[in-house]
Amino acid sequence: MTPETPSPSPLSFFGLGIAPTLLESLERLKFTTPTPIQQKSIPIAIEGKDMIGIAQTGTGKTLAFGIPMIQRLAQVKGKGLVILPTRELALQVDETYQKVGGRHGLRTAVIIGGASMERQKQMLGRTPHVIIGTPGRIIDHINQRTLNLHDVTILVLDEADRMLDMGFAPQIKRILQTVPKERQTMLFSATMPDDIVRIASAHMKLPVRVEIARAGTTAERVAQELFVVRKEQKNRLLDKLLTEYHGTVLVFSRTKFGAKKIARAVRAMGHSANEIHSDRSLAQRREALDGFKSGKYRILVATDIAARGIDVTGIEVVLNYDIPENPEDYVHRIGRTARAGRAGRAISFATPDQGSEVRDIEKLARVNLPISKLPELPPERPPLPYEKPAERPYGRPGGGGHRPFGGSGGRSGGRRPFPRR
């Protein structure tokens, strides 16, 4: 890999080599100050160089590759291909492309699982400039010969580490064998595992590495907190915390079965909640995410399918009901809060036997998770006899029991039940 090129000095999109029409679009969308990954990546990508961008979630990577791709496709023949791990992320990337390039005639096609193949074939038949999709569905269209990638000149692998974690390596390898060798390749990731290094070595030409934060770095303005709690106490602790925080809360479960149970329990507590996991249809997942964005649901319960697929500003708390299996997922989960320079809070529940998993997270993120003393827990609530979500309006920020952001955990005095490494 070649060394990183110097970053431009002005803290604006002017001077980054962006075409005037796209600058107008950015100004209209009120994008005035580039994030660090945008400031460093855009000039490199506009030059057509291969690039590896390492940056934590919530730092604006979509514009970092989207602006250069839109601009270069107006200058060179061919099409762009963006590969992402989840349906939700693909839809959000498409939304950004449409906002920036739609008024300039940019055509996109989104090909994702859970959506109509016929509808996708129609979109592909309109000769889109950019194809945005998940690996499995891209392969489905290649197999049915409804997608030909012979004219792809710009390829983006977004959230590459997550795609490898989800077992997409064989599909990605096949897609990389299908697209032309003479192309520009941009790879974006929050971490830099060995598998990504191998992809870079085998399929990229002297990529420029742009690293905004060390791999595994968590978002700067997230106050992190850990409770050591027995499994049977988790629902009661969740009940207590949901009465203290009055904004939006994203709750993570390890399994889809657990997500269903947690969502049901949260509704029994009197909160408006929905769930996102692999047992939900695409329409159900979109309704849940749209409802979370609009305020219809205050709490969203999700498996790690949503750790990289949710782009919602203003999430007050990310709550890890279950410690993730992979420490990297902790970084991606808590990156859902404190986005776009805002503050946020991440709260994790760990059982007394999960000391090694907590230490793995601390080692990767180079943090000591502050342990909070368990508060007095409310009694267990009976489950709802039916599944209709209860709706309750948000409390006022700063109202009774609301704790402000910041600090190292708030509830001091908790003794660490397992030793540090």
Image (cartoon, rainbow, N blue to C red):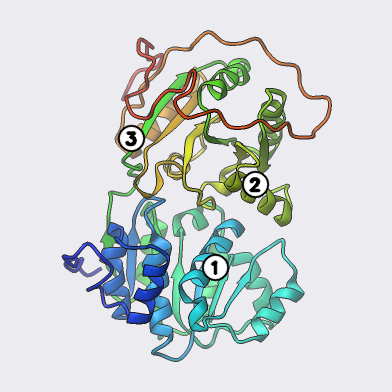
Type of amino acid at the residue the image marks with label 2: Gly
Quadrant containing the N terminus in the rendered view: bottom left
Query: From mark 1 to mark 2, how far is it between C-alphas?
Result: 19 Å
Task: Tell me the mark number nearer the camera, choosing from 3 and 2.
Answer: 2
Q: Is residue 144 left or right of residue 370?
A: right
Type of amino acid at the residue the image marks with label 1: Asp
Residue at figure coordinates x 56%, y 53% from the top left: 166
Query: From mark 1 to mark 3, how far is it between C-alphas?
Result: 35 Å
Residue at figure coordinates x 38%, y 83% from the top left: 72
Q: Is residue 331 left or right of residue 381?
A: left
According to the image, label 3 marks what residue?
Answer: 363
Say which quarter of the image contains residue 398.
top left
According to the image, label 2 marks what residue?
Answer: 291
Residue at figure coordinates x 42%, y 58% from the top left: 195
In the rendered image, the vertical position of residue 26 relative to residue 313, given as above or below: below
Numbered disc 3: secondary structure: helix
Residue 144 seen in this snapshot: no
According to the image, label 1 marks what residue?
Answer: 94
Q: Residues within 10 Å of mark 1 (few under 14, many from 20)?
A: many
Residue at figure coordinates x 64%, y 39% from the top left: 297
Q: Nearer the viewer, residue 227 or 385?
A: 385
Q: Residues within 10 Å of mark 2 (few under 14, many from 20)?
A: some
Numbered disc 2: secondary structure: helix
Task: Tell me the mark number nearer the camera, choosing from 1 and 3.
Answer: 1
Type of amino acid at the residue the image marks with label 3: Lys
Say which quarter of the image contains residue 127.
bottom right
x and y percent of residue 352 in the render? 49, 17
x and y percent of residue 298 in the render? 60, 36
